[in-house]
Amino acid sequence: FKQKTAYEISACLVGSEMCIRDRYNPCLMKWTKDSWKNFEAKQMPAYADQGNLDSVIEELSSMPPLIFAGETRSLKSQIYQVQKGESFYLQGGDCAESFQELNPNTIRDNFKLLLQMSVVLTFATNKPVVKLGRMGGQFAKPRSSDFEEKNGQKLPSYRGDIINSFEFNESSREPDPKRMIRAYNHSASTLNLLRAFAQGGFASLTQLNKWNLDFADNFDTTKKFKELSEKIAESIKFMNACGVNEKNTRELRETDFYTSHEALLLPYEQAFTRIDSTTGEWYNVNSHFLWVGDRTRDPNGAHIHYLSGIKNPLGLKVGPSTTIDDLKKNIEILNPENEGGRLTLIVRMGADKINSKYPDLLKEINKLGLNLTWICDPMHGNTSTSKSGYKTRATENIFKEIQSFFEIHKSEGSVAGGVHLELTGLDVTECVGGPDDIKDENLGDRYHTFCDPRLNVNQSLELSFLLADLLSNGEMN
Ligand code: PEP
Ligand code: CO
């Protein structure tokens, strides 16, 4: 009796062809919300006391869900529209949310910025924009090293506020399971406010002029946005005259906004894995959309296994080290029924690698003719260290990678669905370049990120105008 590999077991658990053929070696293990424990889980913190961890997971397991399964089904069908080229996909927010930065203004400003960007994109493409925030749960971070060394002291790396604390001392860096309860409470209050913004009138297209971020008043991008707002206001007046207005048309009055985060800290995700009473299927009810990171996407690993059993729409990062074979395996495990909108491939090659690494991969996978949505993350392959020692990204490289991504898709006759960005509505100086021409020596001015450098408001708006041009073949200028 041959021992199954983890990949074969995962294939079995999702009932794939490969397992059905393998009838002499029946699957002995069913997927459950904690069956990920039978696989290697990378990037997991070492909690000192198992008892404390278990009691936190038990407490979280009885907490109310943050989202409803039905909402994730709507999102899935919207992502399917993206795959068909009928909508544009915009996902963005902090690299890592922090407990400290959580306040109503930050949430409002990130939300405003994403709304502004989606208006620019809708105007350019005449397509709706599917909006996902890296918000309301983006607290856990994978790290390239388990330890950080400073002045001869070696401590565990900071892994996001849901796990430990940023300060460099022994007690701060000790993973504390109770932080998961704080993360849940923060996510709940973030989501509560986002729902109010999205549905309570703030997101109404008639409020467009109120989405401007005050401190950004003097910049060209903001002026450009104001001009666009005026054109939209004119169109709305015309629609009103024809009888289409806020009162009778939901689309003018409110918007759909979804949350997403990296499914990294599996005990936490497990606590929010529940059966949906209307379908009897398993869903993660903490976030609408979950993705697996570039460091945890091993087809034999615990993260892929966990995600295979839930029905939410999923993302899979595709980096320069992704092999065609592993990608095929992950696609089979994560989307065995070839469902539209289920799987979004988030490509993050880097501006210098995308042209050599991506076309072959895309060609090979396209040959399978499967339902997949491709989007570009131009952030994570373009991180460098500035002379002054800050982790930064050049907007120039970010734009370049996006441009290459769209060109490659065009030449392959395949739909480029949208973008996945790290950005903030705060006026930070973390990425170099952009309308205010941030240079290496300016990075220290307002460098607030706890993890990766984010685009600020002007850089984000500039990027949305650039995208708009790419999508409308230069008609925006
Ligand atoms: C991230 O999205 O913050 C991240 C860590 O990305 P990746 O897994 O692609 O490196
Ligand atoms: Co990041």
Image (cartoon, rainbow, N blue to C red):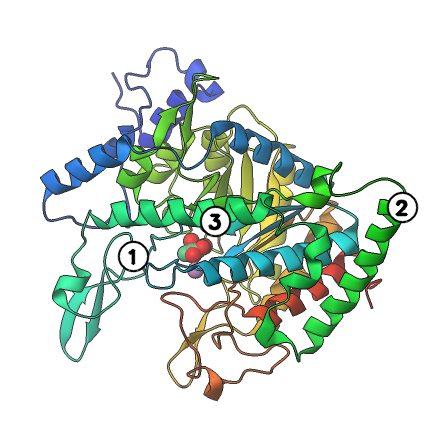
**Residue 40 position (above or below residue 461):** above
First-in-chain label (3 vs 2): 3
Q: CA distance from mark 1 to mark 3?
A: 20 Å
Residue 111 screen position, x and y as percent:
55, 56
Q: Check disc 2 and report the residue beneath it.
A: 241
Asked if labels 2 and 1 touch by Cβ distance under 8 angstroms, the answer is: no
Q: Residue at the location (60% across, 66% down)?
A: 460
Residue 418 screen position, x and y as percent:
64, 51
The quadrant in which the C terminus is found is: bottom right
Residue 144, quarter of the rendered image: bottom left
Q: CA distance from mark 1 to mark 2?
A: 50 Å
Q: Check disc 1 and report the residue beneath it.
A: 161
How packed mark 1 is, by other alpha carbons closer than 10 Å (few <14, some 14-19, many 20 or more), is: many
Residue 77, quarter of the rendered image: top right
Residue 277 screen position, x and y as percent:
43, 18
Q: Closer to us: mark 1 or mark 2?
A: 2
Q: Check disc 3 and report the residue beneath it.
A: 193
Specify the amino acid type for callout 1: Asp
Q: Is residue 100 left or right of residue 94?
A: left
Q: Is residue 421 left or right of residue 273?
A: right
Q: Is residue 193 or residue 96 the one in the foreground? A: 193
Residue 366: mark in rendering: none
Residue 74 shows up from this direction: yes
Q: Quadrant of ligand 1?
A: bottom left
Specify the amino acid type for callout 2: Ala
Q: Is residue 374 left or right of residue 406?
A: left
Secondary structure, mark 1, is loop
Q: Residue at the location (53% across, 55% down)?
A: 92
Q: Is residue 397 or residue 171 the one in the foreground? A: 171
Secondary structure, mark 2, is helix
Q: Is residue 25 or residue 374 the one in the foreground? A: 374
Residue 179 screen position, x and y as percent:
24, 50
